[in-house]
Image (cartoon, helix red, strand yellow):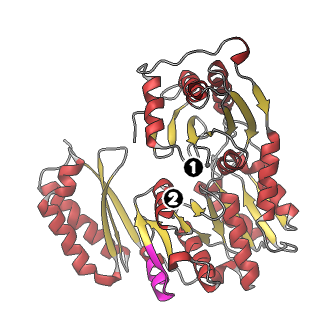
Amino acid sequence: MGKYFGTDGFRGEANKNLDFEHAIKIGRFLGWYYGARLDKKAKVVIGKDTRRSSYMFEYALCTGLMASGADAYIMHVTTTPSVSYIARVDDFDCGIMISASHNPYYDNGIKLLNSNGEKMDEETISMVEDFIDGKIEVPLAERDMIGRTVDYVAGRNRYIGYLISMSKYSFKDKKVGIDCANGASWSIAKAVFDALGAKTYVINNEPDGCNINTDCGSTHIEHLQKFVVDKGLDVGFAYDGDADRCLGVDEKGNIITGDHIIYIYGKYMKERGKLINNKVVTTVMSNFGLYKALDKIGIEYDKTKVGDKYVYENMVQTGNRLGGEQSGHIIFSKYATTGDGILTSLKLMEVMLAKEKPMSELAAPVVFYPQVLKNVRVKSKPDAQNDPDVKAAVAEVEKALGDSGRILVRESGTEPLIRVMVEAGTKEICEKYVDQVIDVIKAKGHLEE
């Protein structure tokens, strides 16, 4: 991770640690880097979510891009995966999404995508940061070389058409609930499900600039759970602010997590001979219950660091076709280069219709193990993590758990914390072993004073 950009873009509270001047500079650099530097005019596509500050950042990015001679194509309010798709299929030099995903409305973020719709490479990100810090100079465009803005709502419509084309089945007579989180999916998701014939029931689709993710969407799925049960719906789907992730609710009101989705669709792919390498990709935070369920049906799995960026990197390197996170970032690499919440919900509908089974039955084999996670603030993350006595304590827990659970000790990527997590048959066992390791960390003097 760089000085400004993390694993999912440059994120912070609007006009505090991420302000309009940052956006202008990012636009200035990208406009030159993909344009004048190569003696051509750059084409950059921009999307935004429904935060009030997204409009400010949109105009600031356009200002920077045009000042460097690039043309900015504006998709307006749209999802992150739609920008990724359009950047890839419509021959753009790069794409920019303005969103802080599931964060509160007062935060925002700038996500950069390359011409393949993938997250921008670290080398280019590093140069963007150098320009922000004044280490690189970029010339201003003059006269007829100054760029322009182009209304590109047609790109969003094209993406909607692409999603509709993804379904092999009609959704006729299926009652589907959708929670749009008052975010970017509000103008897209219902249109897709309606076009496929579903009886679509939507909540939280009235964004006002300050209510994105507020007590709604995938981070507050309890409202969709109640909605699905009260309305007698067949299934429900909840997206986050920029709709790059999806969680589900079955007809009984139970949550369908990213782990359930990986199992359900991985099994479906295997049955049809489509699961290349007979393997799915997870992160280290997937529940032990997922791995036990996958073992039973003979599906292998890779584990990556936390972050859909690392899941996708694995998929590119190995050719694996399905991967994701428990939080609902699911990547279907045949169809997309990033997590796509609406696409994920369409794929779950496909399995329901193909198997002619309710969502509860499809998800039933994944039985989650109780989990306890505690954070310990330490002086030095590497020193605590690599302490021989701490390692010995972790190994002792691993031996005690055997194949009935697991322990994971990892460093926080953003704070001076060591995270100790145990999954086992009961919460009491989890508590016991988490505290056992934390006691050793304390005894060795690693705690921050």
Mark earlier in primary sequence (2, 1): 1
Q: Secondary structure at mark 2?
A: helix
Nearer-the-camera pick, 431 or 27:
27
Residue 443 in view in this figure = yes
Q: Secondary structure at mark 1?
A: loop
Residue flagged by tag 2: what amino acid is it? Tyr
Residue 230, label in figure: none
Task: Please provide percent x and percent y for residue 354.
Answer: 74, 82
Magenta residue check for 221: no
Residue flagged by tag 1: what amino acid is it? Glu
Hey, which quadrant is residue 266 in on the image?
bottom right
The span picked out in magenta is: 291-301
Q: Is residue 393 left or right of residue 223?
A: left
Nearer-the-camera pick, 432 or 140:
140
- Work out which quarter of the rendered image holds the C terminus and state it: top left
Pointer 1 residue:
118
Q: Is residue 438 left or right of residue 363?
A: left
In the rendered view, would you say 339 is above or below 250? above
**Cα distance between the residues tagged 2 and 1:** 9 Å
CB of mark 2 within 8 Å of CB of mark 1? yes
For this orientation, the residue located farthest to the top is 143
Task: Please provide percent x and percent y for residue 300.
Answer: 46, 79
Hey, which quadrant is residue 375 in on the image?
bottom left
In the rendered view, would you say 179 is above or below 115? below
Pointer 2 residue:
312
